[in-house]
Amino acid sequence: MFPIRNSIARITITLHRWMQVNPDAGQSMYAHLYPYAHFVFNAAVCVSAWLVVSLAVERYLLVCWPTRTRSLTSAATSSRSVSISVRKLKTMTQIFVFGFKVVKAI
């Protein structure tokens, strides 16, 4: 998660500096890159939140049902749930990616 956030911060700082040197080119770059940077940042925040949720669920299972946890967290069950989650996330993100329009800078 941190490399994605660091990359977004680096892009933002570079755009800010570029806008000081050449405002017209900086505005144009910002207008083209913002929808993608915004999407990546929101996806990173969402993924980090769901990672915390998955760790909390795992800890809950280990505390409440220590004997059943091995069967609930087997490799087959985990791979099945991960593949289902990935398919759902791909479907959800494809809907929103095409909703952004690049606006020409004034």
Image (spheres, rainbow, N blue to C red):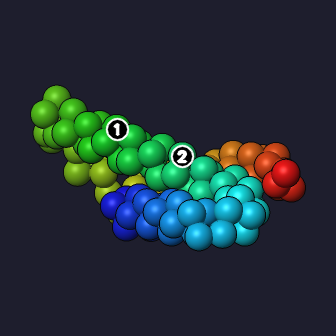
Q: In which quadrant of the rendered view does residue 29 lie?
A: bottom right
Seen as rendered, the residue at the extreme front is 21
Secondary structure category for the residue under label 2: helix
**Which of the 4 quarters of the picture holds residue 5?**
bottom left
The answer to whether residue 79 is above or below residue 55 is below
The residue labelled by disc 2 is 42
Q: Name which residue lies at 82% across and 46% down.
A: 99
Q: Residue at x 38, y 48 (%)?
A: 48
Instruction: From the image, state whether disc 1 or disc 2 is nearer to you.
Output: 2
Give, as a three-letter code, the residue at label 2.
Answer: Asn
Q: Is residue 31 left or right of residue 106?
A: left
Name the secondary structure under disc 1: helix
Front-most of 56 and 48?
48
Q: Farthest residue in the top direction?
A: 64
Q: How many marks?
A: 2
Residue 2 pos. (x, y %)? 34, 61
Instruction: Please tell me which of labels 1 and 2 falls first in the chain.
Output: 2
Q: Is residue 33 visible?
A: no
Q: Which residue is under mark 1?
A: 53
Is residue 84 toward the left or the right of residue 71 in the image? right
Residue at horizontal 21 percent and vertical 33 percent from the top: 60
Numbered mark located on residue 8 in the image: none
The disc labelled 1 sits on which kind of residue? Val
Residue 67: x and y in percent read: 15, 41
Q: Is label 1 in contact with label 2 (beta carbons under 8 Å)?
A: no
- Graded by Cα atoms within 10 Å as few (under 14), some (14 to 19) or many (20 or more), the crowding at tag 1 reads few
